[in-house]
Image (spheres, rainbow, N blue to C red):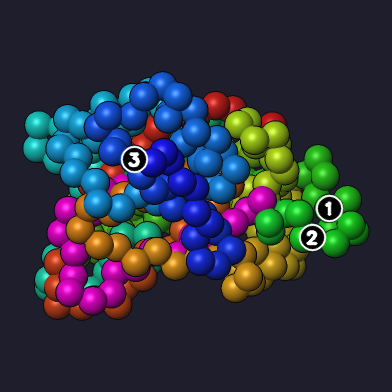
Amino acid sequence: MGIEIRKHEGGCGAEVLGVDLNSLSDADMRIVRRAYADNGVIFFRDQSLSEDEHIAFARRWGEIDINKFFPHIAGYPEIAAVRKEKAQKTNIGGGWHTDHSYDRIPAMGSILVARVLPDQGGDTLFANMYSAYETLDDATKKEIAGLKAVHSNAHVFGSNAYYDNPERREFSNDAAVGEAVHPVAITHPLSGRKALYVNPGFTLRFEGKSPEESRPLLHQLFAHAMKPEFSSRFQWRPGSIAFWDNRATWHFALNDYHGEERLMHRITVAGVALH
């Protein structure tokens, strides 16, 4: 019947129907690549990927970025465990953010496979940074043209940071924290479209300005990008996979399933320098 690309409900992403990720032809792969570049995040249903098949699919996209903070699946250093135990209150990714924007060469994207799901809750929100940029007023586009921002992960993964607590100390790695500088508006390396590239999780300030001086414009950009018309909600089911592009989306893992376990396997694909 062929592949169908169906826009996801809301303002971000598309579902890719009629595919088995274990047997994608090169022609099918070109269609999937185009959908990924155009939509920022693509969703697959009813898939059955082993750990080895998850890795094989990721390698069709590029080099795998081994995560410096997340615990890995036993025997598979390429696969990070995104887990919340029944007794834990803190989840992973519970706020709007873009993965790896704190790296000098940010990751392209992440392939998240559902392994253990709560009976209810645990959905993920995605926001479209193509749309966020394209709907900025002309004055703001002019103001951010050529502007760069400083991104850091020290306040999340460093000493005395968000994950340095009794529930989540396995994520704390002070030796691996760092910061990077990227354009506020990037030209996406696959689609050629402009996208907004700041995020509340890791963007601290504009280059050459203090956090206090940067705050008004940063908060203006964050508030704009959070508008409901740019976002979608993905409800996980067994066999579900989400593959998002960090250069074109934000995401937010909802923490509404206390007392239940949730385990996702994540592989992150390396990217290129942003311009």
x, y percent for residue 234: 40, 64
Q: Is residue 192 left or right of residue 49?
A: right
Q: Nearer the viewer, residue 201 or 242?
A: 242
Q: Along the polypeptide, which appears first: circle 3 or circle 2?
A: 3
Task: State yes or no: residue 93 in magenta.
Answer: no
Identified at 68% across, 56% down, the residue is 131
Res. 51 visible in picture: yes
Q: Are marks 1 and 2 in contact (CB under 8 Å)?
A: yes
Of all residues, the one furthest to the left in this rendering is 74
Q: Secondary structure at mark 3?
A: loop
Stretch in magenta: 112-130
Q: Nearer the viewer, residue 111 or 86?
A: 111
Task: State yes or no: residue 127 in magenta.
Answer: yes
Residue carrying label 2? 136
Identified at 14% across, 67% down, the residue is 261
Q: Nearer the viewer, mark 1 or mark 3?
A: 3
Residue carrying label 1? 141
x, y percent for residue 127: 55, 60
In the rendered view of the protein, which quadrant contains the C terminus?
A: top right
Residue carrying label 3? 19
